[in-house]
């Protein structure tokens, strides 16, 4: 019985770990956000980002643009923040 329980836990645990291969939660990532990580040599997530290209960055998107979780810098969407108004 213990082996069956461990097998189920391992199976579902691996599924959760593989659920979002493009983002992660943890580190400096704020609660409720899925963050990405960019490192030198990788394709830049968006062409308006002007962060230090010599170090890795953890980031997430919100209505203001791209937020660097390490520095708190916000790289604004071209044209300004996205309006959340529905009317």
Image (tube, rainbow, N blue to C red):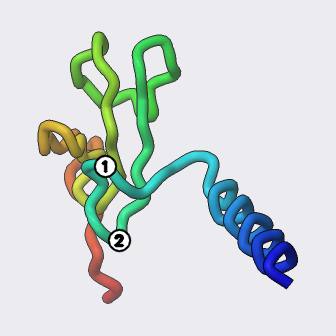
Residue at which label 1 appears: 27
Q: CA distance from mark 1 to mark 2?
A: 13 Å
Where does the N terminus fall, quadrant-wise?
Answer: bottom right
Q: Residue at x 31, y 49 (%)?
A: 27
Q: Secondary structure at mark 2?
A: loop
Examine the rendered structure and indicate whether residue 86 appears above or below residue 22. below
Q: Residue at x 72, y 73 (%)?
A: 9
Q: Residue at x 42, y 29 (%)?
A: 38
Q: Residues within 10 Å of mark 1 (few under 14, many from 20)?
A: few
State which quadrant residue 73 falls in.
top left
What x and y, as percent, mark residue 6? 76, 72
Examine the rendered structure and indicate whether residue 60 appears above or below residue 37. below
What x and y, as percent, mark residue 14? 72, 59
Residue at which label 2 appears: 32
Q: Residue furthest bottom?
A: 87
Q: Is residue 5 left or right of residue 31?
A: right
Residue 63 is marked as: none
Quick one: 84 or 8, which is closer to the camera? 8
State which quadrant residue 76 falls in.
top left
What x and y, as percent, mark residue 3? 84, 73
Q: Residue furthest left?
A: 72
Quick one: 87 or 58, which is closer to the camera? 58
Q: Is residue 18 left or right of residue 58?
A: right
Q: Is residue 69 left or right of residue 41?
A: left
Quick one: 82 or 6, which is closer to the camera? 6
Where does the C terminus fall, quadrant-wise?
Answer: bottom left
Q: Residues within 10 Å of mark 2 (few under 14, many from 20)?
A: few
What x and y, as percent, mark residue 63? 28, 62
Q: Secondary structure at mark 1?
A: loop
Q: Residue at x 40, y 51 (%)?
A: 35
Which comes sooner in the sequence, label 1 or label 2? 1
């Amino acid at each position: 019985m213990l082996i069956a329980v461990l097998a189920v836990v391992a199976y579902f645990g691996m599924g959760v770990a593989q659920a979002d291969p493009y983002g992660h939660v943890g580190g400096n990532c704020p609660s409720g956000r899925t963050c990405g990580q960019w490192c030198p040599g990788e394709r830049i997530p968006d062409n308006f980002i002007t962060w230090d290209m010599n170090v890795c960055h953890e980031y997430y998107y919100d209505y203001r643009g791209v937020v660097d979780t390490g520095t708190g810098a916000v790289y604004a969407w071209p044209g300004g923040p996205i309006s959340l108004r529905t009317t």
